[in-house]
Amino acid sequence: MGSIRDENPENSQVSIEDVTKVLKTRTRHFNLDVTNCNWSSIYRSHHRHITTFRYRKHYFLLGDAAHIHSPVGGQGMNTGLQDAYNLAWKLAYVLTHSPHDHLLDTYHDERFQVAKTLVNTTDRMFSFISNPHWFIRFCRLYITPYLLRFLVQPLLNSSHRLRQLIFRRLSQTGITYCSSKIYDYGASAGNFHRNTPLPGDRFPYVIFEPCYYHFVIFENVQRSTKVNLFIELIKVKYSKLIRIHEGNLPIQFEGAILIRPDGYIAYRTTVFDINHFQAYFNQYFPQEIS
């Protein structure tokens, strides 16, 4: 794989002679030769994304139709799959349970920022890798390898937190929707420890039945009258939407957390305020579900 200068015409082709000449120059110490080329093509890297993931209320764009970028980092396919997952469960819920489609607006709110960040990140990385400027090339070939070997690698070896941060970034398990405007109403009720996950965070490493919301009550919650009334409300009005889990998870958090079908936290509470919960949840499912 190699880069072609911008001044080449759009319909230019790269011949085997061109490749052989460059290869011999770059590998002169190894005496390599090219004798046959079965296939070659010119790949043009594009970096762009659409401005809305939901168009005219009836059309949804995802994957390569919504964002396209260089293959640096290997993030493209996973991003498209997450687009589909985010949209699929919302479509299913609106078709099955909700008289209006406000929930579908959250698809753009959540996935647009992910696509924007991805395109900008891969664009900067690709520009650094392919930039022909002499200084950038000098840094890439002679400085970056030493930085990776003597600075980055020792840091990775000694810091579990840094390794975890990089893993979460590359695996995309660290994606959060905390900054999305859909939570402006306030999907938290009560006071929480600073380490308690926020609405919009991915709930860590617990797999639930994917067709429901899941209301998880943790072991440290005392079963007061208010808690019992809250649970009874869910059983009576939202039994087709929400499954209840009590104290059977190896995770210690405060209060209770409502988890979406895609594994992200929708709501959390330590005060079990029925009115607050209904005001939040009825934004998407306004009618009582029996």
Image (cartoon, rainbow, N blue to C red):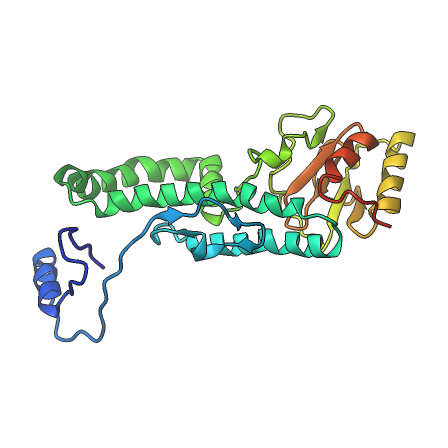
Residue at point 13%, 64% (across, down): 19
Residue at point 73%, 31% (across, down): 254
Residue at point 12%, 40% (across, down): 134
Taking the view exactly as shown, the residue that stands out farthest to the right is: 225
Residue 22 lies, with reference to residue 110, above or below; the image says below
Visible in this render: residue 96? Answer: yes
Q: Quadrant of residue 105?
A: top right
Taking the view exactly as shown, the residue that stands out farthest to the top is: 191
Say whether residue 11 is left or right of residue 73: left
Task: Name the residue nearer the viewer: 24 or 122.
Answer: 122
Say whether residue 206 is left or right of residue 150: right
Task: Name the residue nearer the viewer: 233 or 33.
Answer: 233
Image coordinates of residue 34 in percent, x first then y, are: 12, 70
Image coordinates of residue 275 in percent, x first then y, are: 82, 31
Quadrant in which the N terminus appears: bottom left
Say whether residue 202 is left or right of residue 23: right
Image coordinates of residue 287 in percent, x first then y, are: 81, 45
Say whether residue 28 is left or right of residue 203: left
Image coordinates of residue 157 in percent, x first then y, are: 40, 39
Residue 228 lies, with reference to residue 72, above or below; the image says above
Residue at point 12%, 74% (across, down): 35
Task: Name the residue nearer the viewer: 43 or 157.
Answer: 43
Visible in this render: residue 272? Answer: no
Total number of numbered discs in the rendering: 0
